[in-house]
Image: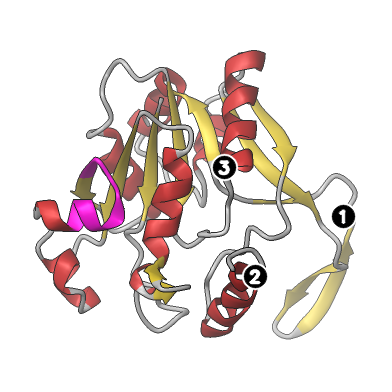
Amino acid sequence: MWAIVVAGGSGHRFGGPKQFLLLAGRPIVAWSVDAARSVADGVVLVVPADASSTGQEMVADIDGDAAVAAWGADRMVSGGPTRADSVRAGLTAVPDDAGVVIVHDAARPLAGPPLFAAVLDAVRVDGVGGAIPVLPVADTLKRTSGGIVASTVDRDGLVSVQTPQAFDAATLRAAHRTGGEATDDAGLLERNGALVRTVAGDPRNLKITRPEDLVIAEALMSAVIP
């Protein structure tokens, strides 16, 4: 079983590539790689295609063994212009004999080993194409147009989706061979007709998107790290 940790984003909403900032004294990406390693035989780290734009010395030396060692990955590849392109780049570095591939966003450093184990077990035991962690939607949802409320969305059956997501490797590769785009890999499997199972997500599994999210992550991390 191999994992792909996607750290190829430019972080437009954050103001820069937040995945390389420090959280509790370590790069955010290092926490995500560590969690992936809890279940994986190997970890592929996908970094920004334009590594020099990150302003990070280790990323600029994209082929350097020092960078791989610093973040704990086994292999490191350059990503593409979209998330799907970056995952496809990561798949090229995953051994052909890997039976399951887990894909995780580096910007979710608080995802713990139990969540990785849960999605992995769902794929191995249930034999489905993929498994994703979800949380029930708590807020009222409305559709708007031009700043005006158009309708209220029935939230029955709606969930928010997290990573890590686990996939049968052959099914994931087939979905990506279509060259499609989606906000997560499960979306590509759905279009290909593959069955995707859900498991209970973790409310602490925050995605760091804006600067204030990093503050919240620091608080959550300090509650579990002495």
103 or 182: which is nearer to us?
Answer: 103
Residue in view at x 73 percent, y 58 percent: 203
Q: Amino acid at mark 2?
A: Leu
Distance CA(mark 2)–CA(mark 3): 16 Å
Q: Is residue 209 above or below residue 129?
A: below
> Which comes before the other along the chain, label 1 or label 3?
3
Residue in view at x 38 percent, y 68 percent: 26
Q: Quadrant of the C terminus?
A: bottom right
Discs 1/2, front: 2
- Label 3 Cα crowd, 10 Å radius (few <14 / some 14-19 / many 20+): some
Residue in view at x 58 percent, y 17 percent: 124
The tag on residue 155 is 1
Disc 2: which residue: 220
Marks 1 and 2 in Cβ contact (< 8 Å): no
Q: Which residues are magenta?
A: 67-75
> Which comes before the other along the chain, label 1 or label 2?
1
Provide residue 200's location: percent of width, then percent of height.
75, 41
Disc 3: which residue: 113
Distance CA(mark 1)–CA(mark 2): 28 Å
> Residue 130 falls in which quadrant of the image?
top right
- Looking at the image, residue 8 sits to the left or right of residue 167; the answer is left
- Looking at the image, residue 117 sits to the left or right of residue 34; the answer is right
